[in-house]
Amino acid sequence: MKKSSWYLLIGTLLVTIGMYTLMGWGHKSVKRYITQPTTTRTTTNTDAVYSLNTFEKTLKRYPSVDVLALANDETNDNSHDLTYRDFSIIPGLKATTTIDSATGERAMGTAMTPQGVTIAGKYLVTSAYDHDERLNSVLYVQDLKTKRLIKTVVLQGRPHVGGITYDPNAKQLWVCGRRDNWAEVFAISLKTLESYQLSKNKPITYSQRALLGTISRASFITYHKQSLFVGFFNPRGAGNIQRYLLDKNGRIQGQSLVGRLSTQVSVLTNAVLRQDTLQKIQGLAFYDGYAILSQSFGPGRSKLYIFKEDPNKTIYHKSDALTTVTMPSHLEQISNHQGRLYTIYESSAYAYRKTSHDHIDRVVSLDLKDFITLIKKEVKS
């Protein structure tokens, strides 16, 4: 090969590596832009991507998950034998009503990617972002009991919305975001969420915004003990979880960034606790003295790690886990509500639909009471 050809080859490789680094920095993987399919729909869809039979077959490939998903706490007033039909279909996977970030006009998105899940009062709330980063991110609000989609809530801008959580005391939803290259979390009051309508083509307003001065990126979040636990996802090394305190009114503590006349609280805050985690952690939940971490990256199988909750712990070592559970691929956030662990997956998103080994287009909840009982028996033995 001629010397000039070698120079050309080396130059091409360097440019390619540079582009991968630039596009992939701070994201869970190198960005792969896609061409979204067109749609004739004018509202957010609520029908499934996969058949009920396909969903059932997927869960049955994971026996532990299948058993815990169909188990139900007998002390629950609404207790009945669960079936595969009882799990809520994730809305918006085929079409989502949102806003075009460039024009501010209403638009339909067909490449929304599910990320977060939480229970807010009587609602099941999930979050999603546009894979092509053209349309505003959204929240889907469903009736927890009937599973009916009540509304699509359009957020400001295009945050990755990797995590959402609910503060039942202050009655407000917290969402992971990013602003001016800073990690951010923002709050939406339940009252504002309930009254929001997209008829005016405007995103929802926030009650609080907080820049997080001690974490690189807000990848996931959970409310626990009057605090927000915010995590940083790292695909190549250790991630971390940091704790941010809330006051009795649910306001995050920190230095004010706006004048007193503003109706929105905006602060710069620092963590009071940092704990290093395993790599590729997507979510955190607490239950009955245990900390549960979800781990996932790409089409490979996901995992749940269960640790004893310890506020003095500085690092979550894999060897300290009481047990691990193999989960379907593309597991994202996890959230605890009344003894069930709600899990959401991005395998049904248009960007991953053809490459994922597992096919889950529903929010799957697992019975934590039976799960923890089994762990306690294993520890004793």
Image (spheres, grey):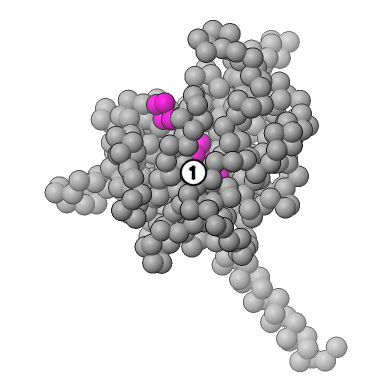
Farthest residue toward the right? Answer: 1
Q: Quadrant of the C terminus?
A: top right
**Location of residue 123 in the rendering, given as x and y in whole percent from the top left corner:** 43, 30
Q: Residue at x 76, y 44 (%)?
A: 357
- Disc 1 is placed on an element classified as strand
Q: Residue at x 54, y 45 (%)?
A: 45
Measured from the top left, where is residue 203 in percent x and y? 35, 52
Q: Position of residue 358 (x, y in %)?
A: 73, 41
| Count of numbered circles in the view | 1
Q: Nearer the viewer, residue 52 or 285?
A: 52
Q: Is residue 29 left or right of residue 181?
A: right
Q: Furthest residue to the top?
A: 75
Residue 258 lies left or right of residue 111; in this view the side is left
Query: Height in image: 321 above or below 332?
Result: above
Name the residue beneath numbered marker 1: 127
Q: Quadrant of residue 58?
A: top right
Residue at position x 32%, y 43% in the image: 196
Residue 176 at x, y = what percent? 44, 45
Q: Which residues are magenta?
A: 114-128
The secondary structure making up most of the magenta span is: strand
Q: Is residue 82 above or below residue 269?
A: above
Q: Residue at x 29, y 34 (%)?
A: 191
Q: Which quadrant of the figure contains the N terminus?
A: bottom right
